[in-house]
Image (cartoon, grey):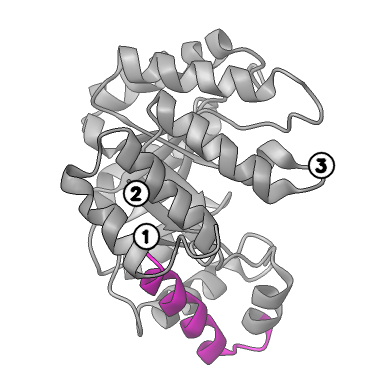
Amino acid sequence: MLIIGELINTSRKAINEAVENRDAEYIKKIAQEQVEAGANYVDVNCGTMVFDEVETMEWLVNTVQEVVEVPLCIDSPNPKAIEAGLALAKYGQPLINSITGESERYNEILPLVLKYKTKVVALCMDDSGMPETAEDRMQVARNLHQKLTAAGVAEDDIYFDPLVKPVSTSDKAGLEVLDTVRLITQEFPNVHKVCGLSNVSFGLPNRKILNQLFMVQTMSMGMDSYILNPLDATMMGYVQASATLLGKDPYCMNYLNAHRKGLYDNK
C-alpha cells in the first residue's frame, strides 16, 4: 500500500504562509512528520504560486530533501514547475501528478516521464471532458494504457486515478469510482490505482467518516495507493486494518505494529 503525504500544498493556509515567508523549518517539520507517520512519498504542490511557481518548487524540493530521504510526488498543472522539481529530486523514483488523456497535457508530460524515468498518475479524463460513468473512465484508461505502454512506460509505473467526485453532487459518484477501480484491476492487473479521498465528501458534514469508509470500499475493489493526510492516525489505522483483512499483511505483522503504535487506541 503506497501512501502519498498530501500536506505540503500551498492551497492549505498554513503551508501557503510558510512558503511565502520561506519558513523552511515549518516545511521540514511537516515533511518529517508525514514520513514518520508512514508516508512512502511526500507530495510537493505549489500550484497556487502562479507567478513564481518554478522558483518556489525548487525551494520546496530542496527544503523537503534536507530532512527526508523518500521519493517525491511532484504535483502541478505547470509542466515547467514539474520539470524543475524532477531535476532536483534525488531519492528514489519520483512520481508525477498527473498526466491525462487530454492531448495538450499528455504531450507536455510524457517527455518528462521518459526523461526522468518517473512513475506517473494517469487521471481518467480526456478532451471530451469530465467522465460520468465507469465506462467513460475506462475508455480513457484503455487509451492511456495503450499510449503509455507503447511509449515505453512500464505498467508498474502507471497509477490510474479514477477521478473521485463528490457524492453531494451525484449520488452515484462513489459507486462509479468503485466500478472503475474494479474494472481497471480486472483488465490491467499490473498497473496501480491511486486517488485522493477527500473529494468524495465535499460539501457534506462529518467528512472524515465518509473518507475513511470510502477508503475501505475502494481498497476492496483493488485500490493500492492513496493521497491522504498521514497525520490522521485513525485513517492510517484503518488503511492498515483494511489491508490486513484483504490478505495483504502476512502474519498480520503490519497490523500488530500499528497496534503497538497506538493507532487503534480508543477506537
Label located before the other in sequence (3 or 1):
1
Q: Residues within 10 Å of mark 2 (few under 14, many from 20)?
A: some
Residue at mark 1? 41
Residue type, label 2: Leu
Are dots 2 and 1 in contact, CB under 8 Å? yes
Are dots 3 and 1 in contact, CB under 8 Å? no
Are dots 3 and 2 in contact, CB under 8 Å? no
x, y percentage for residue 216? 49, 36
Q: Which mark is residue 204?
A: 3
Indicate yes or no whether the magenta region holds residue 258.
no
- Is residue 61 positioned above or below 115 on the image? below
By secondary structure, the bulk of the magenta-drawn segment is best described as helix
Q: Which image quadrant for residue 12?
A: bottom right
Q: Which mark is residue 218?
A: none
Can residue 222 be seen in the rendering of this structure?
yes
Which residue is at the front of the view, 102 or 185?
Answer: 185
Label located before the other in sequence (2 or 1):
2
Q: Residue at x 25, y 39 (%)?
A: 248
Label 3 to label 1, Cα distance in Å? 29 Å
Can residue 143 be seen in the rendering of this structure?
no
Q: Which mark is residue 2?
A: 2
